Amino acid sequence: MPKVLFVCLGNICRSPAAEAVFRQQVVAAGLVDQIEIDSAGTSDWHLGKAPDQRMQAIAEQRGYDLSGLRARQITAEDLDHYDLILVMDKKNQADVEVLATELEQLEKIRLLLSFNPGAIQEVPDPYYGEAADFHQVIDLVESANQRLLVHLRQRFAL
């Protein structure tokens, strides 16, 4: 069973959105029992808190439910447990790479938008932005996650 972890800074905007979008795509593909999905943050600022209300509202408008998600911080154990650790930006990537103790762990860490060729490389943090910035996050993760699902189906013969 492939295991995917989405990571951003606080685990209240981008990574929970990516988790919820991907979860819905996996359910629609009939693979809900075949892929493990979670999200985490590199910081401990929002531990146990629900996603940002603005992200929840925009996601709900787009058909995604983030209300049951709670922020957690990535751990060194996550690098062993997950097959793919998909970070939202290069700063997140650098922060996660510090936790790696083996080359195999480093190879699991990728920018989410590496699955969206031709797009920008990083999912911008909408926290200090406007509604359009939150919509952009959903657009980016929807597109990248569609390609991620194709990748997992091929790699794991799902």
Image (spheres, rainbow, N blue to C red):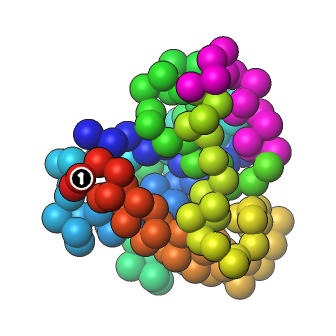
Residue at position x 26%, y 39% in the image: 1
Callout 1, which amino acid? Answer: Ala
Question: Where 134 falls versus 111 (above or below)?
Answer: below
Image position, residue 46 (x, y; %): 65, 39
Image position, residue 118 (x, y; %): 69, 78
Find the magenta span and give its range. Answer: 91-104
Q: Work out which residue is located at the far top of the displayed protein and give it.
A: 101
Q: Is residue 55 left or right of residue 131?
A: left
Q: Is residue 123 left or right of residue 116?
A: right
Tell me the quadrant of the picture where the C terminus can be found.
Answer: bottom left
Image position, residue 67 (x, y; %): 42, 58
Quadrant in the rendering for residue 150: bottom left
Answer yes or no: is residue 114 visible.
Answer: yes
Answer yes or no: is residue 12 visible.
Answer: no
Residue at position x 64%, y 23% in the image: 103
Q: Is residue 24 located in the magenta-colored stretch of the structure?
A: no
Disc 1 crowd rating (10 Å Cα; few below 14, some 14-19, many 20+) is: few
Q: Is residue 141 left or right of residue 81?
A: right
Residue at position x 70%, y 33% in the image: 96
Q: Secondary structure at mark 1?
A: loop
Quadrant in the rendering for residue 74: top right
Quadrant in the rendering for residue 128: bottom right
Q: Is residue 103 located in the magenta-colored stretch of the structure?
A: yes
Q: Which residue is mark 1?
A: 157
Question: Where 138 falls versus 110 (above or below)?
Answer: below
Q: Is residue 92 left or right of residue 34?
A: right
Image position, residue 105 (x, y; %): 58, 26
Specify the principal SS of the magenta part. Answer: helix
